[in-house]
Image (cartoon, rainbow, N blue to C red):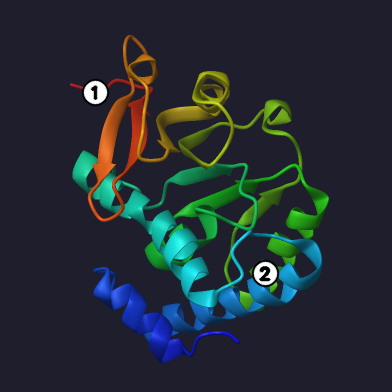
């Protein structure tokens, strides 16, 4: 059983995210489709609707707080979500921020099929690249990744795709080696106790 739009709106509101009616409808459809596809394709490990909203939708939007606090101007920028899986964090960012150009990079064909279908279902305009990130030649203003392998291995790959910023969503524990001499800074998400490691690739113009 899924959650009603009003229940979804309440969960977001309690976490400080105000949604329009259109955004509520899109998140409700997104949840419904994840639950439906999950029966066959195992898109996410969570099966309980509330946990999907909390652990995937809302967790994705902690990047918004990070963008605001770090001072990232995201409007009109190109953003790559590397290893997007079922669309996290890229699709929630697109629904919530609206004025952002999202490309989802995902190597799994079944997940790519879901992302392409979802785009039509919820009426959002984003791109899906169904390839390994190592094969992507395009570069993006902002590159984000969530739950994507070992930091030491993925950081150089993400930086190679970025023109400006890289954001890596990690758990509640980070290693000193992830920040020492790498240029990455830790951002603590107070609501969850987890960290986002971020780095500016291009120095700000004077």
Q: Quadrant of residue 120?
A: bottom right
Specify the label residue 118 is tagged with.
2
* Distance from Cα at disc 1 to Cα at disc 2: 39 Å
Q: Residue at x 48, y 68 (%)?
A: 51
- Write down the residue under mark 1: 205
Query: In the structure shown, which secondary structural element does the residue marked by tag 2 occupy?
Result: helix
Quadrant of the drawing holding the C terminus: top left
97 vs 76, nearest the viewer: 97
Q: Residue at x 27, y 37 (%)?
A: 187
Query: In the structure shown, which secondary structural element does the residue marked by tag 1 occupy?
Result: loop
In the image: residue 27, left or right of residue 32: left
75 vs 38, nearest the viewer: 38
Measured along the vertical axis of the image, is residue 16 above or below residue 106? below
Q: Residues within 10 Å of mark 1 (few under 14, many from 20)?
A: few
Q: Residue at x 40, y 86 (%)?
A: 7
Measured along the vertical axis of the image, is residue 51 above or below residue 5? above
Disc tally is 2
């Amino acid at each position: 059983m899924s959650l009603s739009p009003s229940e979804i709106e309440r969960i977001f509101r309690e976490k400080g995210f105000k949604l329009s009616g259109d955004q509520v409808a899109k998140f409700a459809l997104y949840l419904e489709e994840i639950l439906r596809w999950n029966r066959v394709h195992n898109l996410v490990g969570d099966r309980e609707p509330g946990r999907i909203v909390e652990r995937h939708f809302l967790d994705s939007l902690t990047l918004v707080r990070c963008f605001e606090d770090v001072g990232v101007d995201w409007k009109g920028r190109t953003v790559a979500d590397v290893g997007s899986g079922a669309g996290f964090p890229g699709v929630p960012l697109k629904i919530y921020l609206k004025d952002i150009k999202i490309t989802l990079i995902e190597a799994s064909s079944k997940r790519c099929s879901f992302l392409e279908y979802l785009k039509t279902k919820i009426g959002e305009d984003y791109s899906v690249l169904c390839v390994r990130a190592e094969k992507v030649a395009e570069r993006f203003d902002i590159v984000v990744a969530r739950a994507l392998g070992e930091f030491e291995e993925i950081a150089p790959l993400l930086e190679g795709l970025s023109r400006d910023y890289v954001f890596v969503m990690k758990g509640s524990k980070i290693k000193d080696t992830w920040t020492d001499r790498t240029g990455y800074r830790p951002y603590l998400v107070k609501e969850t106790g987890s960290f986002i490691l971020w780095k500016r690739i291009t120095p700000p113009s004077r």
